[in-house]
Amino acid sequence: MTVGDLAGNYIIKGHNQDAFKSSYEGELTLSIDSNNRIIAQWRISGNQLQEGTGFFKDQILVINFNYKGEDAIVFKGVVVYKCLSTDLLDGFWSEKHGDPEFLGMEQAYRISENKELLN
């Protein structure tokens, strides 16, 4: 698998970095820049936009991300995905100001051209 194989659109499902494991869904778009770095954009629950950049090595994808929360406060974190295939990413994440006792969890499933999950 190469970094270019990961470019595309994914449906994401996960839970937050808290004791309640509050769930969320959304979409993730991965593209590649001229230096073979990952450019990531998440849209969580239809309205929250998160962006990040990262790198890929040995089937591991690491992305530093950020987003603006309430009152325009910028939140930062890192997500690590194990690339099980080009169609399935299994990850965990943490934010700088999140609850340090927990990790967020997320899976990303590639969206086919007709927006159905691949089997």
Image (cartoon, grey):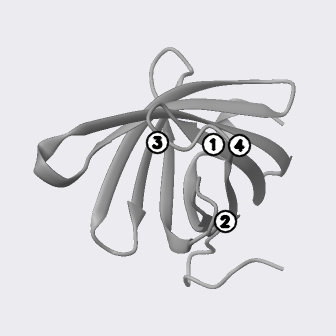
Residue assigned mark 3: 40
Residue underneath mark 1: 93
CA gap, disc 4 and disc 1: 22 Å
Q: Are marks 4 and 1 in contact (CB under 8 Å)?
A: no
Q: Position of residue 64 (x, y in %)?
A: 50, 28
Residue marked by disc 4 = 5
**Of pointers 3 and 4, the one earlier in the residue sequence:** 4
Q: What is the three-letter code of the residue carrying label 2?
A: Arg
Residue 93: quadrant of the picture: top right
Residue holding disc 2: 110
What's the CA distance linking mark 1 and mark 3?
A: 14 Å
Count neighbours of disc 1 (C-alpha within 10 A) and say few if under 14, some if 14 to 19, many if 20 or more. many
| In the image, residue 93 above or below residue 26 | above
Residue reaching furthest to the left? 71
Q: Amino acid at mark 4?
A: Asp
Instruction: Give yes or no for contact between labels 1 and 3 (Cβ–Cβ under 8 Å).
Output: no
Contact (Cβ within 8 Å) of mark 1 with mark 2: no
| Residue 38 shows in the view | no
Choose the circle earlier in sequence order: 4 or 1.
Answer: 4
